[in-house]
Image (tube, rainbow, N blue to C red):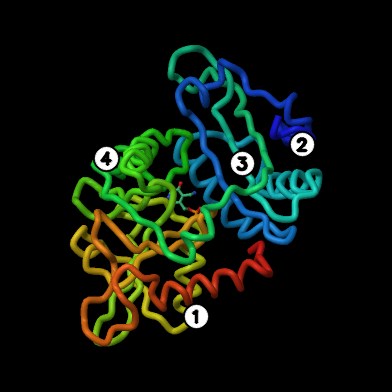
């Protein structure tokens, strides 16, 4: 198996991957009742581990899941799992389920969450997409309303996103834009979204506010910081479909994808229309390139927090 020789941390112990298992009565399996994090290892360092753990514990609090370990214990457990797998560059999946219980949805009879940590090689988008950009569609699936279930909770229920992802793949593209029930951009199926638009000849970087119904992406936060440090204006503001069609540049951010340019949406080329512009429609723009470079520099010496 692909995971042969790998060590999984589960409920406080490192075990060979084949021996690490979750109960068929676990509510994570039965109801998607649980939470998770996806984290990157760069050159042996875990990028923004404390920030990821903070988000995990916020998700836990929101769904009233009592983590059986403290954030410090989880911090050490992640580092221990990375070391046990001798992984210098890779991906960490940290999962906390509600644990095994009865067949009803009531979480109270689940006495103890199951917590596990997998370390794996990272599967990246082909380099071509970083060089030439991605094509997206607008999903027909509305992102679940923050009033119904906050997309800030990184839960084990990804069906809303999976339907949009499936729609994208069936349309022959890899990602889709998900709008909220107000028609504003929320995020992509597993990434946050940014636009760049020149306003009075100054590039303005915009991403939806958390209230639009997106995950508070760790990469989103890093990229906002990098953009501000580069002297760019950064806004968290609602974005409409028309704003996307008329943006000068667009990109997605995520732990897996990092910073990935978008050059086409719903068969419209993204790019400036004005003569004498910085780049042609359908080409990766200069601000996106600058932020990709800044991000690559940052992860060379991945700050753990
Ligand atoms: N939105 C969704 C729905 C996601 O699953 C992810 C990936 N975790 C993101 C945004 C990006 O967040 P991050 O930068 O923390 O990976």
Local SS, label 3: strand
Separation of residues labelled 2 and 3 (CA atoms): 13 Å
Q: Secondary structure at mark 1?
A: helix
Return the mark for residue 7. 2
Residue 216 in sight:
yes
**Residue 206 visible in the displayed image:** no
> Closer to us: mark 1 or mark 2?
2
Residues at marks 4 and 1, CA–CA distance in whole angstroms: 35 Å
C-alpha gap between disc 1 and disc 3:
31 Å
Q: Is residue 287 above or below residue 7?
A: below
What residue is shown with label 3?
Answer: 94
* Label located before the other in sequence (2 or 4): 2
Task: Reply above or below: 43 against 186.
Answer: below
Q: Secondary structure at mark 2?
A: strand
Category of crowding for the residue at label 4, using alpha-carbon neighbours closer than 10 angstroms: few (below 14), some (14–19), many (at least 20): some
Give me the residue at 48% from left, 20% from top: 30
**Mark 3 residue CB less than 8 A from any atom of ligand 1:** no
- The residue at 39%/37% (across/down) is 162
Q: Which mark is residue 229?
A: 1
Q: Earlier in the sequence, mark 3 or mark 4?
A: 3
């Amino acid at each position: 198996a692909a995971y042969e020789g790998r060590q999984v941390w589960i409920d406080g112990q490192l075990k060979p991957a084949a021996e690490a298992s979750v109960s068929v009565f676990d509510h994570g399996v039965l109801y998607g009742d649980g939470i998770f994090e996806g984290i990157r290892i760069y050159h042996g360092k875990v990028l923004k581990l404390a920030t990821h753990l903070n988000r995990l514990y916020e998700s836990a609090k929101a769904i009233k899941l009592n983590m059986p370990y403290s954030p410090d214990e989880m911090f050490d457990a992640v580092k221990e799992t990375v070391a046990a797998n001798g992984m210098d560059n890779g991906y960490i999946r940290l999962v906390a389920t509600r644990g095994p219980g009865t067949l009803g949805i009531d979480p109270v009879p689940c006495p103890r969450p199951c917590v596990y940590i997998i370390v794996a090689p990272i599967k990246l988008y082909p380099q071509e997409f970083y060089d030439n950009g991605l094509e997206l569609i607008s999903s027909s699936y509305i992102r679940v309303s923050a009033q119904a279930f906050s997309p800030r909770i990184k839960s084990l229920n990804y069906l809303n996103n999976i339907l949009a992802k499936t729609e994208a793949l069936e349309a022959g593209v890899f990602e889709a834009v998900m709008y909220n029930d107000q028609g504003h951009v929320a995020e992509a199926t597993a990434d946050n979204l940014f636009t760049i638009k020149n306003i009075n000849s100054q590039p303005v970087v915009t991403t939806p506010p958390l209230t639009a119904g997106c995950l508070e992406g760790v990469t989103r936060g890093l990229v906002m910081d990098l953009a501000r440090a580069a002297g760019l204006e950064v806004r968290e503001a609602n974005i409409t479909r028309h704003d996307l069609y008329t943006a000068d540049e667009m990109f997605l951010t995520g732990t897996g994808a990092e910073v990935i340019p978008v050059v086409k949406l719903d068969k419209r080329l993204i790019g400036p229309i004005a003569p004498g512009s910085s780049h042609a429609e359908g080409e990766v723009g200069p601000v996106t390139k600058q932020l990709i470079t800044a991000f690559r520099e940052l992860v060379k010496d991945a700050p753990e927090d």
